[in-house]
Image: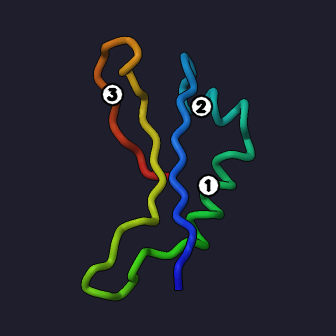
Amino acid sequence: MAGTKLKVWFFFKDKTPAQVNKEFPQLLPAIKAAKAKASKINEGLANEEMTVTANYHICGHDTGEACGEVHEI
């Protein structure tokens, strides 16, 4: 059976993760709920793909700086 693969990237300029969470309090719980219901592509098979992921980091690409550490949601 085919399924839906959803990949979303957000860039919130000049905002820390805490500020984003405060401004969008429903975002993190929604991501966690979707992640809990998702399954890996080809789960249990030799060609299983790690497709159930969600993470965040501080991105410095727009200012020429390095990105921060990646944190799993």
Residue type at mark 3 is Cys
> In this image, 54 relative to 28: left or right?
left
Q: Is residue 17 left or right of residue 50?
A: right
Percent of width and height locating residue 23 = 72, 30
Residue at position x 53%, y 79% in the image = 2
Determine the image quadrant of residue 20: top right
Upstream in the sequence, badge 1 or badge 3?
A: 1
Residue 3 x %, y %: 55, 75
The percent position of residue 69, horizontal first and vertical second, equals 33, 36
In the rendered image, the vertical position of residue 50 relative to residue 1, given as above or below:
above
Tag 2: residue type?
A: Ala
Task: Kindly identify which numbered label has been placed on residue 20.
Answer: none
- Cα–Cα span, label 2 and label 1: 15 Å
Going by the picture, which residue comes out furthest to the left?
A: 46
Query: What residue would you read off at disc 2?
Result: 18
Amino acid residing under circle 1:
Ile
Please name the residue that numbered disc 3 is placed on.
67
Q: Residue at x 46, y 41 (%)?
A: 56
Report which quarter residue 61 is drawn in. top left
Mark closer to the chain start, 3 or 2? 2
Label 1, label 3: how far apart the Cα atoms are: 22 Å
Disc with the residue nearer the chain's start (2 vs 1): 2
- The residue pinned by badge 1 equals 31
Residue 28, position in %: x, y?
64, 48
CA gap, disc 3 to disc 2? 17 Å
